[in-house]
Amino acid sequence: MLALKRNKKGRLFSIDFPNLDPTAKLSQNKEVGWLVPQILRDRWTLILGKVEEKLPKLLEELGNIDIFYHDSLHTYEHMMFEYKSAWRKLNKGGLLISDNIDLNNAFKDFCKEVKASWIDLVNVGFALKK
């Protein structure tokens, strides 16, 4: 976020479903996006809703993207949905980043499928689109 502010270009979009799960890891009395400092929020857009509904529309509106970061539902099916959706709109030289790639084989399987170069840094995967 700080790089977006300093460069005076770029935008971060977050899609999140309102937290109604009492067992979720979100700190008490914290809202979605609480980690984004107020001073940096002018380059951040929060979209509330289900990723399956909101992500395709957002990607279509944006056209192309440089970076995609997955850190939502960590089921194999959901991760593959996000990866495939984002990869189609990712520019050459762009990065697909995914948290918790150790929870299933989705990231590795996806990288093999699209023949992407990738690395694993402490269970965070980085795939480069050539």
Image (cartoon, rainbow, N blue to C red):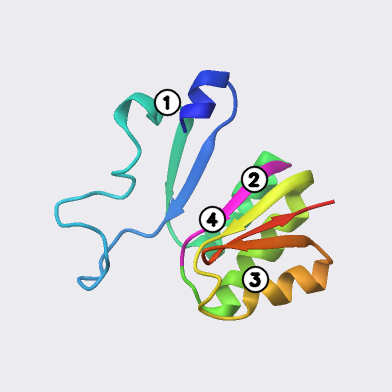
- Of callouts 4 and 3, which one flags the residue occurring earlier in the amino acid sequence? 4
Residue interval drawn in magenta: 64-72
Q: Are marks 4 and 3 in contact (CB under 8 Å)?
A: no
Closer to the camera: disc 1 or disc 4?
1
Q: What residue type is labelled 4?
A: Lys
Residue receiving disc 1:
42
Looking at the rendering, which quadrant does residue 98 occupy?
Answer: bottom right
**Which labelled disc corresponds to residue 54?**
4
What separation in Å lies between label 2 and label 4 (alpha carbons)?
Answer: 17 Å
**Which labelled disc corresponds to residue 71?**
none
**Which labelled disc corresponds to residue 107?**
3
What separation in Å lies between label 2 and label 3 (alpha carbons)?
Answer: 15 Å
Q: Which amino acid does label 3 sit on?
A: Phe
Packing grade of label 3 (10 A; few <14, some 14-19, many >=20) is many
Packing grade of label 1 (10 A; few <14, some 14-19, many >=20) is few
Residue 11: image location, x then y, percent: 55, 33
- Of callouts 1 and 2, which one flags the residue occurring earlier in the amino acid sequence? 1
Is residue 2 part of the magenta span, yes or no? no
Q: What residue type is labelled 1?
A: Asp
Closer to the camera: disc 1 or disc 2?
2
What separation in Å lies between label 1 and label 3 (alpha carbons)?
Answer: 31 Å
